[in-house]
Image (cartoon, helix red, strand yellow):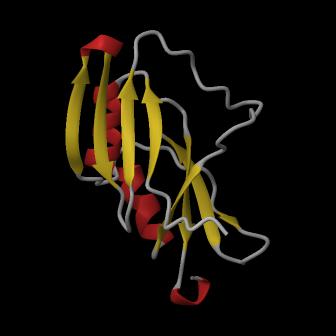
């Protein structure tokens, strides 16, 4: 078996780095670790800490095509974040102007979950986890 330790980071290319910074840092609360200008690539990179471990890397590049979501395309489908109280998390997002889909029940685990999107339409999931569900 390959001795992997954990997921280290997830990288997202953003159409507007400032809008994504506001969403991930200010609304979702991911602390900013570093920011790097990359003039040779006409790019900027913003590193954020993800609660529970790992990092989220936000990149800007000129003229990036939109992400194909509908119909769903091959590749990364969504990012999911565990929450202890999904009702409180949905209320927090709503207070910050983030639209959230209807609450659903996972057929396999019986746990509650829902989806919302980042500023570029990347699907994000909230999945309620109780101690019994871990």
Residue sitting nearer the eye, 15 or 94: 15
Q: Is residue 108 above or below residue 66?
A: below
Residue 122 at x, y = what percent?
Answer: 55, 37
Residue furthest top as drawn: 63
* Image quarter in which the N terminus is found: bottom right
Residue sitting nearer the eye, 96 or 17: 17
Q: Is residue 34 above or below residue 29?
A: above
Residue sitting nearer the eye, 29 or 93: 29
* Image quarter in which the C terminus is found: bottom right
Number of numbered markers: 0
Q: Is residue 59 left or right of residue 67?
A: left
Q: Is residue 76 left or right of residue 124?
A: right
Query: From where the camera sits, is residue 119 visible?
Result: no
Q: Residue at x 30, y 48 (%)?
A: 48
Residue furthest bottom as drawn: 132
Q: Residue at x 64, y 42 (%)?
A: 76
Residue 133 at x, y = what percent?
Answer: 60, 83
Q: Residue at x 26, y 46 (%)?
A: 26
Q: Is residue 103 left or right of residue 50?
A: right
Residue sitting nearer the eye, 96 or 32: 32
Q: Is residue 43 above or below residue 32?
A: above
Q: Residue at x 72, y 78 (%)?
A: 110
Q: Tell me the quarter of the picture where residue 44 sits.
A: top left
Residue 127 at x, y = what percent?
Answer: 57, 66
């Amino acid at each position: 078996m390959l001795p992997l330790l954990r997921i280290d980071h997830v990288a997202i290319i953003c159409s507007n780095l400032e809008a994504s910074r506001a969403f991930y840092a200010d609304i979702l609360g991911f602390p900013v670790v570093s920011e790097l200008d990359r003039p040779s690539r006409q790019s900027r990179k913003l590193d954020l800490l993800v609660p529970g471990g790992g990092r989220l890397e936000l990149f800007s590049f000129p003229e990036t095509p939109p992400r194909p979501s509908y119909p769903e395309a091959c590749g990364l489908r969504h990012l999911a974040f565990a929450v202890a109280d999904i009702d409180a998390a949905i209320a927090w997002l709503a207070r910050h102007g983030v639209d959230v889909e209807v609450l659903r029940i996972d057929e396999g685990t019986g746990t509650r979950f829902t989806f919302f999107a980042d500023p570029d339409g990347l699907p994000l999931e909230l999945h309620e986890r109780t101690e019994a569900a871990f």
